[in-house]
C-alpha cells in the first residue's frame, strides 16, 4: 500500500547500488510500494512490480531485447511500460493501447539507482551541494545496509554526536571524554548546518590512529544528511553522506558515500569493513528504540544542549509535515 507522504513521495530515493543491477530485474520496495527495477541498453527503468495480466511480480521475469518479460505468460513490456507482446494472442490481433503498466521516474547517479514515485523536483537526484567530482578526493560508495527501523530514526542516530563515546567506544569516541561542547545549529538555504564540534576519537576510520576531530553536521533533505570531519593538526578531511531509503514505515535501507583527501591509495575494503562494524553497532540501538516512529512532539522526550541538532531535525520534519516514519 502506497503511503501518500506529501514530501517523500516526490523525492528521489536510492534503491540499489548500480553494480548490483545487472541483467536480472530486481524487486525493491519504496514507501511501501513494490517496484521492479531493470536495466536495458537505454538505461534504468522502474515499474510497479505487478503484471497487469494476473498480478505476478515482474521482478520474477527477465529482460530480453531491452524489454521486460513476465514469468507467467510472457507478456512483454517496453521501457516505457507499454505492453508490446502477448504470446497467447492469435496473430493479427492488436494489443489494446491501455495495456500499460505504471511507470516511475528512475535514474542512475553517484553509484546508485534512484526512484521517484511522484513528481521529482529535480530532473536527476542531487545530494546537497556535492557533485563528487573533486579530483583531490577519493570516494567510496557503501551499502545497502538493512535496518529494521524508521528512516527518521536512522537519520537521527547519524546526527547524534553524544552516542559516539558509547555506541562506538574505542573507535569514534572514548567515554572518558564524553562531554560535548556547546554548538549551534544554523539554517542555511533550507539546510541545517552545525558549528564544528570537537571529539576525541581513538580510531576513527579503522586505521589505528587516535585523533581530535572537528565534526560539522548537515541536514540536506529529510533522509539525506552528512558530516564533514577535519582532523585537528592535519589537512585531512573526511565527509560521509547517509541517504536512507524508506522501505516501510518501520524499515529502511541505508546507503553511504564517503569522501576523503588522505590515504588515497588505501583499498576501499578497509573503509567499508570499518563502516560495516559501525553500522552494526548503530543497528542494535535504532532497531530497539521506542517508539518505533520518531516522535516530532518535542515534549515527548528529554533533551540536552548537545541534542540541539536532533531537536532541529525533528522541528524541520514537523514543519515540512512529513508523516512517514514519524509520530
Ligand atoms: Fe504476467 Fe500473465 S501474469 S503474463
Ligand atoms: Co553511530
Image: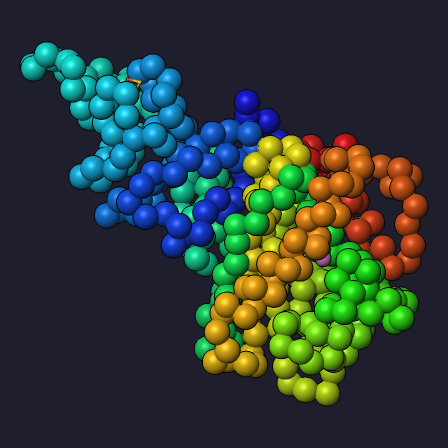
Asked if residue 146 shows in the view, the reply is yes
Question: Against 120, is 306 above or below?
Answer: below
Question: Against 179, is 74 above or below?
Answer: above
Q: Quadrant of ligand 1?
A: top left
Between 269 and 161, the one nearer to me in the picture: 269
Between 115 and 244, the one nearer to me in the picture: 244
Split into 4 quadrants, where in the image is the N terminus? Answer: top right
- Residue 197 location, x and y as percent? 80, 70
| Residue at figure coordinates x 19%, y 19% from the top left | 86
Split into 4 quadrants, where in the image is the C terminus? Answer: top right
Q: Image check: 177 left or right of 173?
A: right
| Residue at figure coordinates x 72%, y 47% from the top left | 284
Q: Image check: 49 left or right of 236?
A: left
- Residue 34 location, x and y as percent? 47, 29
Between 145 and 240, the one nearer to me in the picture: 145
Question: Against 88, is 136 above or below?
Answer: below
Q: Image check: 139 left or right of 22?
A: right
Between 68 and 207, the one nearer to me in the picture: 207
Asked if residue 77 shows in the view, the reply is no
Q: How is the image coloured?
A: rainbow
Instruction: Locate residue 25: give its quadrant.
Output: top left
| Residue at figure coordinates x 34%, y 14% from the top left | 54
Amino acid at each position: 500500500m502506497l503511503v501518500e507522504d506529501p514530501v517523500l513521495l516526490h523525492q528521489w530515493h536510492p534503491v540499489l547500488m548500480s553494480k548490483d543491477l545487472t541483467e536480472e530485474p530486481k524487486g525493491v520496495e519504496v514507501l511501501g510500494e513494490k517496484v521492479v527495477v531493470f536495466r536495458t541498453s537505454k538505461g534504468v527503468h522502474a515499474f510497479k512490480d505487478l503484471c497487469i495480466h494476473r498480478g505476478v511480480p515482474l521482478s520474477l521475469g527477465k529482460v530480453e531485447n531491452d524489454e521486460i518479460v513476465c514469468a507467467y505468460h510472457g507478456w512483454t513490456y517496453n521501457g516505457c511500460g507499454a505492453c508490446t507482446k502477448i504470446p497467447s494472442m492469435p496473430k493479427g490481433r492488436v494489443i489494446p493501447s491501455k495495456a500499460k503498466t505504471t511507470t516511475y521516474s528512475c535514474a542512475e547517479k553517484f553509484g546508485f539507482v534512484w526512484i521517484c514515485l511522484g513528481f521529482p523536483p529535480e530532473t536527476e537526484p542531487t545530494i546537497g551541494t556535492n557533485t563528487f567530482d573533486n579530483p583531490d578526493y577519493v570516494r567510496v560508495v557503501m551499502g545497502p545496509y538493512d535496518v529494521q527501523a524508521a528512516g527518521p530514526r536512522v537519520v537521527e542516530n547519524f546526527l547524534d554526536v553524544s552516542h559516539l563515546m558509547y555506541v562506538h567506544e574505542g573507535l569514534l569516541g572514548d567515554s572518558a571524554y564524553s562531554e560535548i561542547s556547546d554548538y549551534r545549529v544554523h539554517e542555511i538555504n533550507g539546510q541545517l548546518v552545525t558549528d564544528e564540534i570537537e571529539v576525541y576519537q581513538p580510531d576513527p576510520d579503522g586505521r589505528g590512529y587516535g585523533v581530535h576531530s572537528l565534526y560539522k553536521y548537515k541536514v540536506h533533505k529529510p533522509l539525506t544528511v552528512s558530516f564533514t570531519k577535519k582532523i585537528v593538526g592535519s589537512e585531512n578531511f573526511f565527509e560521509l553522506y547517509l541517504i536512507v531509503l524508506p522501505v516501510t514505515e518501520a524499515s529502511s535501507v541505508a546507503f553511504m558515500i564517503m569522501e576523503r583527501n588522505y590515504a588515497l591509495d588505501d583499498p576501499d575494503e578497509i573503509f567499508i569493513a570499518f563502516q560495516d562494524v559501525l553500522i552494526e553497532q548503530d543497528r542494535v540501538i535504532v532497531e530497539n528504540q521506542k517508539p518505533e516512529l520518531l516522535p516530532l512532539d518535542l515534549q515527548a522526550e528529554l533533551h540536552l544542549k548537545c541534542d540541539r541538532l536532533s531537536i532541529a531535525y525533528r522541528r524541520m520534519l514537523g514543519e515540512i509535515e512529513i508523516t512517514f516514519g514519524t509520530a
